[in-house]
Image: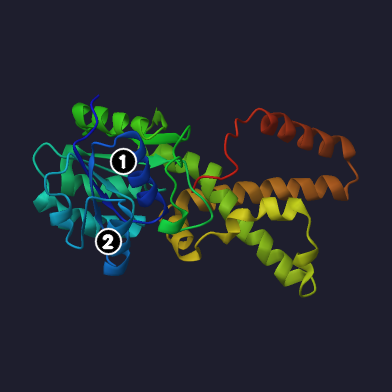
Amino acid sequence: MSSPARVAIFGPGLIGGSVALALRARSPGTKISIWGRRPEQLAEILQRGIADSVETDPAAAVSGADIAVLCTPVESMRDLAAAMAPGLTPSAVVTDAGSVKACVVEQLEPLLGSRFIGAHPMAGSERSGLAAARADLFAGAPCLITPTSGSDPAALQVVSGFWKELGCSVTMMNPPEHDRLVARLSHLPHALAFALVNLVLNTLPAGSHHLAGGSFRDATRVAASDPVLWTGILTENRTEVVAALREMSKLLESMATALGDENPDSILDFLARAKQHRDSLPLPSPEEAP
């Protein structure tokens, strides 16, 4: 597939900024338009040459675009889609980078029709904002694409090719399957990291966390993520996250029972199975996906 002539990016944060930088590096001929709410940030984007144009009007941002990419919080996508729709050309395709898919697809398909193809690049950082954006953020990262029975096959091909061009490996699945999987691979780990920090703050003397070794820092790295962003993500995928938290609670309770019953064989089996699976994971980057 040939590179898009013009791409409109909504949201110049970590993900949107990284999309723009990756396009600059991998598809230098592509014209980039970035939509944002803060004029001072848009001025910085132009000054740094990250985009060819910037807009505060959604319909103007997508004028002439082949692809529009929503990189904003999930809860703002519906309003943006409605505002951009009048400016889209008939052949334009829209995708997103949201961490939750069922609610996004349910809200955006009626507004954008078969031209909308949901996607979720599994790449990110506990840091946020344009300053954290990187041209190589998507290199080697999985991208979960979530077409529906109403998706246009040509639009699906365009979106798949777009994320591949940014460096992603693409996997297709339906939106509910995505939300169940990501609740356990991404959302639950974030929730547990926040919970572990709060456990230490609530149960140990003040300042105890300064005595922690690498295991605590590694396990809680993503607790440095934006609480507002993650409140939105966990809330939008609350059904699957609640189920995952309850599944984890049962596992922790069974571990506590085995320890209380002095059953080292059960503990050894529990830990050994986890280590075997953990050792088999490909981990090309020290940073986790949102």
Give the mark toward the camera: 1 or 2.
2
The percent position of residue 133, horizontal first and vertical second, equals: 43, 51
Q: Residue at x 26, y 68 (%)?
A: 39
Compared across the picture, whether 104 is left or right of 99 comes to left
Q: Residue 206 bears which disc, if any?
A: none
The percent position of residue 108, horizontal first and vertical second, equals: 23, 48
Q: Nearer the viewer, residue 22 or 242?
A: 22
Residue hosting label 2: 36
The percent position of residue 139, horizontal first and vertical second, equals: 46, 35
Residue most extreme to the bottom: 206
Q: Residues within 10 Å of mark 2 (few under 14, many from 20)?
A: many
Compared across the picture, whether 101 is left or right of 33 comes to right
**Helix, strand or loop at mark 1:** strand
Compared across the picture, whether 136 is left or right of 165 comes to right
Residue most extreme to the right: 262
Q: Residues within 10 Å of mark 1 (few under 14, many from 20)?
A: many
Q: Nearer the viewer, residue 7 or 29?
A: 29
Q: Amino acid at mark 2?
A: Gly
Q: Does residue 110 sit above or below 265 in this rendering?
A: below
Residue most extreme to the top: 1
Q: Nearer the viewer, residue 113 or 128?
A: 128
Q: Tag 2 or tag 1, which sits nearer the N-term? A: 2
**Helix, strand or loop at mark 2:** loop
Q: Does residue 185 sit above or below 80 in this rendering?
A: above
Q: Are marks 1 and 2 in contact (CB under 8 Å)?
A: no
Q: Residue at x 27, y 66 (%)?
A: 37
Q: Residue 118 bears which disc, if any?
A: 1
Q: Nearer the viewer, residue 64 or 258?
A: 64
The image shows a total of numbered marks equal to: 2
The percent position of residue 144, horizontal first and vertical second, equals: 40, 35
